[in-house]
Amino acid sequence: MDVTRAGVRRVLLATLLLNLFVSGAKIVVGLLSLSLSLVADGYHSLLDASNNVVGLVVAAFAYAPPDRGHPYGHRKFETAAALFIGLGMLGLAYRVAEEALTEVSGSGPPSIGILNWVVMLTTLAVNVFVSWYERREGRKLGSEYLVADAAHTRSDIYVTLGVAASFVGARAGVPWADRAVAVAIAAFIAVLAARILVGSLNILTDRAALSPEALSSIVLVVPGVRRCGSIRTRGGPHAILVDLIAYVDGDLTLREAHDVADRIEQALLQAVPEIVDVVVHVEPDPQV
């Protein structure tokens, strides 16, 4: 767990610095050139940076071992943080859409110059790297927070391409291109937010994480098991908890029944690496 926690902190610190750089560049240049779409993209990147800060705080708690107050561990701190990301993205989407659809007094068409394009190309390269890096490390470390944040950062890539399209429109004399792209950015952010929120709520509400039928097929081939039932699963994609009832011969000794439970646990852990805990209730088969 200490290795995982240190790895998550390392990734978040690196991406925080990069996100602060690209967000600052886009906001400053966007304001100077009156490009609403570029400023909106900068806010999007700034939210990435704030998520990194939240993640650094969460990493100090989410990977702590189980204790008296949290006997099942602290992984849901991470899930709650992913939920925070989704809520923040929804708020940002609303703000961007509101600004894009409201006429701003005294604002003129954006003035697109070489500096805008330099910022676009630089931030595009940074965003591609950050998204790939967070996604790879998130899967390697089993961190749903990093995977969720990578999805958010990945949206910056498509948003940045949209902003570049608005630059082309502005240079071609299309006055509404900048606001249209800003609205599209808001819609894109909202869709990604909904996906993250649904995934986080599924975990927090203990939605089934695996198919009972799939697990049953694994359990039934374990020597000594006659039937199984009441298979329940919960947790996230990298930390699944399982409990079930295994029916065995009622004449087995306590030691023999315990050995069957151990074999079931090992079979499930080997077949599904995402499973981190298995509770087996052994009962005599009433059908015998």
Image (cartoon, rainbow, N blue to C red):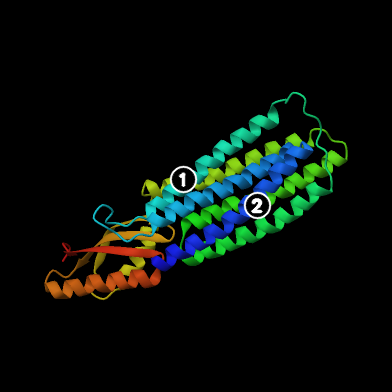
Residue 273 seen: no
Residue at 26% x, 62% y is 279
Q: Position of residue 212 (x, y in %)?
A: 35, 59
Q: Position of residue 282 (x, y in %)?
A: 19, 65
* Left or right: where 23 falls relative to 242: right
Location of residue 265 (image quadrant)? bottom left
- As displayed, is residue 181 above or below residue 271? above
Q: Position of residue 120 (x, y in %)?
A: 75, 51
Tag in front: 2 or 1? 2
Determine which of the numbered discs, if any, sits on residue 83 in the image.
1
Residue at 51% x, 63% y is 10
Determine which of the numbered discs, if any, sits on residue 178 in the image.
none
Pick the residue in front: 65 or 76. Answer: 65
Residue 166 seen: yes
What secondary structure is found at the residue carrying circle 1? helix
Quadrant for the N terminus in the image = bottom left
- As displayed, is residue 60 above or below residue 4? above
**Amino acid tagged 2:** Phe
What secondary structure is found at the residue carrying circle 2? helix
**Amino acid tagged 1:** Leu
Label 2 CA crowd tier, 10 Å (few <14, some 14–19, many 20+):
some
Q: Earlier in the sequence, mark 2 or mark 1?
A: 2
Location of residue 264 (image quadrant)? bottom left
Pick the residue in front: 206 or 7. Answer: 7
Pick the residue in front: 197 or 5. Answer: 5
- As drawn, the residue found furthest toward the right would be 172
Label 1 CA crowd tier, 10 Å (few <14, some 14–19, many 20+):
many
User: In this figure, which residue is indicated by the disc labeled 2?
Assistant: 21
Residue at 56% x, 65% y is 136
Quadrant for the C terminus in the image = bottom left
Q: Position of residue 261 (x, y in %)?
A: 23, 70
